[in-house]
Structures are given as structure tokens and as C-alpha cells.
């Protein structure tokens, strides 16, 4: 099992792509339910804000997880995997955890120190918990 963060943000993708890949709360719950049904994904939390879309997950294999996420985003938002290859990133294991701390502390924000991101992460966690898409590892 590996922890990964697959996503895009204000540093890697223009606003048009970030807007196209954004999820509403209702869609986020659907994403949680659908992706944890996939063999490659064991646990999942989706963080979707105006400046980032990130899938934080526990996966069987990094490659299968990335492939599953790209296919899902391609189908759900009708965006090519080629675009995702150009604007997306993937952090694994220790690097993923460090990335999450940088995001939570707003060091990875457009405006360093902005207070909203921590609340958005708490909301994303609460929704993933409510949807049952996180388990023993992500909490």
C-alpha cells in the first residue's frame, strides 16, 4: 500500500483547466464512492478548491492509481490524459505527506499564509469520512 497525491494546482495548470476539473460537494461524494470501488484505490479524499484539485489516496500501486485517476478524470470531465500528463503531478509516500503539510500550512498557496486552505482540508476530510472513502490509514 502506498500513499499518493495526484493533482494539479495554480503552479501547474492555467485557470481554465482548474475550473474544468473542479468538483462540487455533490460531485465530490460521487468521486469518493466511485473511485473506492476501483481495485487500485483503497482509500480516497478529494480536495477541490479554486486553486487545486488533488486526489489523496491509499493505492495498491502508484502506477495503477495514477492510471485509474487519469481515466476517471478523462471520463468525468472529458479532459484528455495528455493534458493531465502536462499539468498534473504525483507525490508518493514521504513526499506526499510533506506536500500535504505544505498545502495545509498554506506554504503551497497562491498567497502564502492565507487561512482558508486548512478549513477546506478539514471539510474535505469530513466529507470523505462521511462518504466512507477513508479508513485506517488516511485518518
Image (cartoon, rainbow, N blue to C red):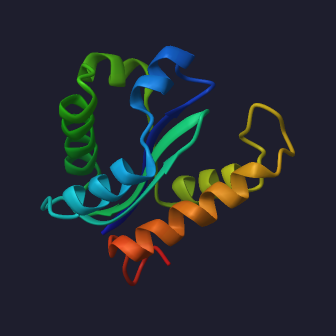
Indicate the position of residue 29 as horizontal and vertical percent values.
34, 59
Q: Looking at the image, is 39 positioned above or below residue 7? A: below
Provide residue 126's location: percent of width, then percent of height.
52, 71
Residue 36: x percent and y percent? 23, 64
What's the residue at 47%, 45% (across, down)?
A: 54
Direction from residue 135 to residue 123 in the image, left or right: right
For the N terminus, give its image quadrant.
Answer: bottom left
Work out whether 6 lies above or below 130: above
Residue furthest front in the image? 26
Taking depth in this image into account, of 66 and 51 the one nearest to the observer is: 51
Question: Residue at image x 58%, y 63%?
Answer: 123
Q: Nearer the viewer, residue 52 or 66?
A: 52
* Residue under the point 18% across and 36% down: 71
Above-or-below relation of 49 to 55: above
Q: Position of residue 69 (x, y in %)?
A: 27, 43
Q: Quadrant of residue 70?
A: top left
Q: Nearer the viewer, residue 62 or 101?
A: 101
Amino acid at each position: 500500500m502506498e500513499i499518493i497525491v495526484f493533482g494539479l494546482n495554480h503552479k501547474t495548470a492555467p485557470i481554465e483547466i482548474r475550473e474544468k476539473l473542479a468538483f462540487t460537494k455533490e460531485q465530490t461524494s460521487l468521486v469518493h464512492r466511485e473511485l473506492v470501488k476501483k481495485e487500485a484505490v483503497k482509500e480516497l479524499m478529494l480536495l477541490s478548491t479554486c486553486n487545486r484539485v488533488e486526489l489523496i489516496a491509499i493505492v495498491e500501486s502508484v502506477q495503477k492509481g495514477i492510471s485509474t485517476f487519469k481515466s476517471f478524470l478523462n471520463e468525468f470531465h472529458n479532459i484528455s490524459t495528455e493534458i493531465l500528463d502536462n499539468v498534473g503531478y504525483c507525490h508518493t509516500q514521504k513526499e506526499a505527506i510533506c506536500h500535504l503539510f505544505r498545502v495545509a500550512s498554506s506554504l503551497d498557496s497562491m498567497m502564502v499564509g492565507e487561512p482558508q486552505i486548512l478549513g477546506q482540508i478539514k471539510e474535505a476530510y469530513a466529507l470523505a469520512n462521511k462518504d466512507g472513502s477513508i479508513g485506517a490509514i488516511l485518518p
